[in-house]
Amino acid sequence: MLQLNDALTYSYWHARAPEFFQQPLVRVFEWLRFPGDAIFIVGGIFPVVYLAVRMFINRNRPGGHGWQEEGEFTRFAGGENLKA
């Protein structure tokens, strides 16, 4: 609302100027936003990091791709035999 008021009073470029963002009230609102932004960032990045760590840990798990070696044939976990 502060930026909209400034844009309507002076101009769009005045409301986008660095001097606008250095005003004390605008700086207070920036810091009030910080906790919510931090929660949003951590909540969004945590699932990605969790899945990446799980994939890294399970990367060498035997049979991880559904294929098992059986002599000259390779057997798929679904049951059909395919020539290697």
Image (cartoon, rainbow, N blue to C red):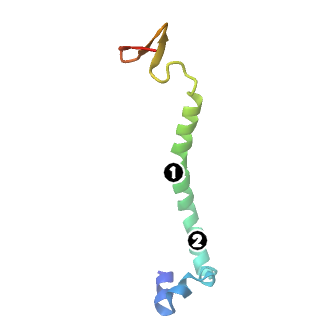
Front of the two marks 2 and 1: 1
Q: Residue at x 36, y 14 (%)?
A: 79
Q: Residue at x 58, y 71 (%)?
A: 30
Q: Residue at x 59, y 83 (%)?
A: 17
Which residue is more in the foreground, 46 or 63?
A: 63
Q: Amino acid at mark 1?
A: Gly
Which element type, helix, strand or loop, lies under badge 1? helix
Q: Which residue is disc 2 drawn over?
A: 30
Could you say which quadrant of the image residue 75 lies in?
A: top left
Q: Position of residue 82 (x, y in %)?
A: 40, 15
Marks 2 and 1, how far apart in space? 20 Å
Q: Amino acid at mark 2?
A: Glu
Q: Is residue 66 above or below residue 35?
A: above
Which element type, helix, strand or loop, lies under badge 2? helix
What label sits on residue 6 in the rendered view? Answer: none
Which residue is more in the foreground, 6 or 78?
A: 78
Q: Position of residue 9 (x, y in %)?
A: 48, 92
Residue 40 in the figure: left or right of residue 31: left
Residue 58 in the figure: left or right of residue 68: right
Which residue is more in the foreground, 71 or 19?
A: 71
Residue projecting furthest to the bottom = 10
Q: Earlier in the sequence, mark 2 or mark 1?
A: 2
Could you say which quadrant of the image residue 25 lies in?
A: bottom right
Residue projecting furthest to the front = 83
How busy is the neighbourhood of tag 2: few (under 14 within 10 Å), some, or many (20 plus)?
Answer: few
Q: Which residue is disc 1 drawn over?
A: 44
Residue 57 in the figure: left or right of residue 5: right
Q: Are marks 2 and 1 in contact (CB under 8 Å)?
A: no
Could you say which quadrant of the image residue 58 lies in?
A: top right
Q: Is residue 38 above or below residue 66?
A: below
Q: Residue at x 47, y 15 (%)?
A: 68
How busy is the neighbourhood of tag 1: few (under 14 within 10 Å), some, or many (20 plus)?
Answer: few
